[in-house]
Amino acid sequence: MTSQPYLLTPQREASEGNQSRRVWRTAWLEALLLLTITAALVFGARLLALRLPADLERAFSFAYALLPLGLWLGISYAAERRALQPRRNLIAVVMLGGLVASGVAVPLSAIFAAEEWLSTASGLDRIIGYTLTTGIVHEFLKYAVLRYSVWRTEFNTRLDAVAYAIAAAIGFATALNIHFALNNVLSLPSAALRMTEITLAQVAISPILGFVLYELRKPNVFVLTPTLGLLIAALLNALTIVIRAGLIVSGLSRTSTSNNAIYGLGMAVFIVVVLFSALSFLVRAADEREMLRAGEVR
Amino acid sequence: MRAEELTPLSLRQRLANYLVILAAFAAVAYGFIYRNSIISATFPFINREAGITARYPARWLLDESDSRFVLRAQDPDTLPFKTAIRLQLIPIGQDARPADILDLLDIDRAARLPAYRSLSRTPTVLPGGQRGQQMIYAYAYIDPNPFLQAEPITVRALDLVVLRTGQAVVITYEAKADVFEKHKHYFESFLRSLTF
């Protein structure tokens, strides 16, 4: 005969929230830390009038390209490993995201050369053009990484889908950042700003893909849901490019235009706040609706 | 492995997934078409006085204010040297031949343009059927603003001379040497639309 041990405090019911990492909390923390570090770097460099040798600046830019990945490993992945039921294959998804970005997205972007023909086009042409080129390529590649790697085995809850989508976006953004750091000669604050914008835009949009991919898990899914999700993600990707470009040109006068890259960060902050808030609300609402429906069935 | 992994996908799931792939490929294909439509978009140019009509690239800047040219269109995106198409009319005598006009341009440019070199001359036929002669040449472009401290740029250019009653029509295309061939399709499209 076995006896149950006597506990001083009642045993907590193991809920989904306790077993796995809290995805939104770590995602917010990473975004906030990345923004804080970038803002500190930009304003610190302005205050100190920091000028580094070109080689050193490139080396720091390269290191900065890896910062989002470092933050993700230090916060999200570390929290995942401490969880009772950690999500598997997150590192593999990050690597796949990086591989498709460097192997497909970067060469395709060079073929499209969207900056060459869209830079002088009208606002609407720019939005459509970027949606049909950069936007759709980026988002479809992330979709493909998730759909053909962990979708069937690991997408058990909506938060799983969001966690894996963010992992794919982190890998994707890291590859784009490395490509940017190696192929542009910019001051460290300017490079840091651009790479932060790339990362935050990729990460903020990716939960949309996770959300629709989770819907695809249901046998009676509405057939257009994943397609609409992909198109919305591609459109948002394009909007971040177009609006950022409009925001960073400031101080237009009859004789010159001046450039203020810090305004571009405003767009990234806006999209992170809006999309993270909207999607966390949507995920919670959908989960609650499903729980209620399941309760009614019982 | 979990049990649900083994359940086969429903028809709706498979269809939804195929639709995503189809939509992505269709969007990229349309992206290429859209790109071409923007790149090859043109605006009409009509000069009734000179009896010339043509279509020039929509994104280029048109200049008709210079009395030396009937038309000058420049690509504002190709700094530091703007790719350009020019059309000028030169009055000629009764026995003038296209080669004479090229000789005249040759002498004028040799005196005006640094490191000017005429590279080749060939007979040519315009898309409209008019016979003429073309000359390819190169020179060094030096930015007139000394404060820019810019290096000289090698420019490659093409003159096409066609005669009509009492006038020689000189159509010039010039671009930075490394993008000369890449941008030449603008000039070819311009020639196809040109009537005089």
Image (tube, grey):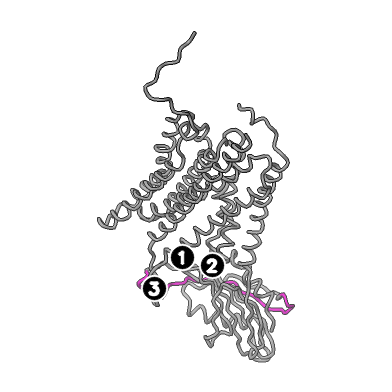
| Amino acid tagged 2 | Gly
Q: Secondary structure at mark 3?
A: loop
Q: Which residue position is annotated with label 3?
A: A256
C-alpha distance separating marks 3 and 2: 21 Å
Q: Which residue position is annotated with label 2?
A: A123
Q: Position of residue B150 (x, y in %)?
A: 40, 68
* Label 3 chain ID: A
Q: Position of residue B123 (x, y in %)?
A: 69, 74
Neighbour tally class for label 2: few under 14, some 14-19, many 20 plus, Cα within 10 Å: some
Q: Is residue A40 visible?
A: yes
Q: Residue furthest left?
A: A48
Q: In the image shown, does B143 or B20 lie closer to the viewer?
A: B20
- At horizontal 55% and vertical 68% (from top left) the residue drawn is A121
Mark earlier in primary sequence (3, 1): 1
- At horizontal 25% and vertical 55% (from top left) the residue drawn is A48
Judged by depth in the image, the label closer to the viewer, 3 or 2, is: 2
* Label 1 chain ID: A
| Amino acid tagged 1 | Gly
Mark earlier in primary sequence (3, 2): 2
Taking the magenta stretch, the answer to whether it contains residue B62 is no
Mark 2 vs mark 1: tell me if same chain.
Answer: yes
Judged by depth in the image, the label closer to the viewer, 3 or 1, is: 1
C-alpha distance separating marks 3 and 1: 16 Å
Where does the magenta region start and end? Answer: B127-148
Q: Secondary structure at mark 2?
A: helix
Q: Which residue position is annotated with label 1?
A: A246
* Label 2 chain ID: A
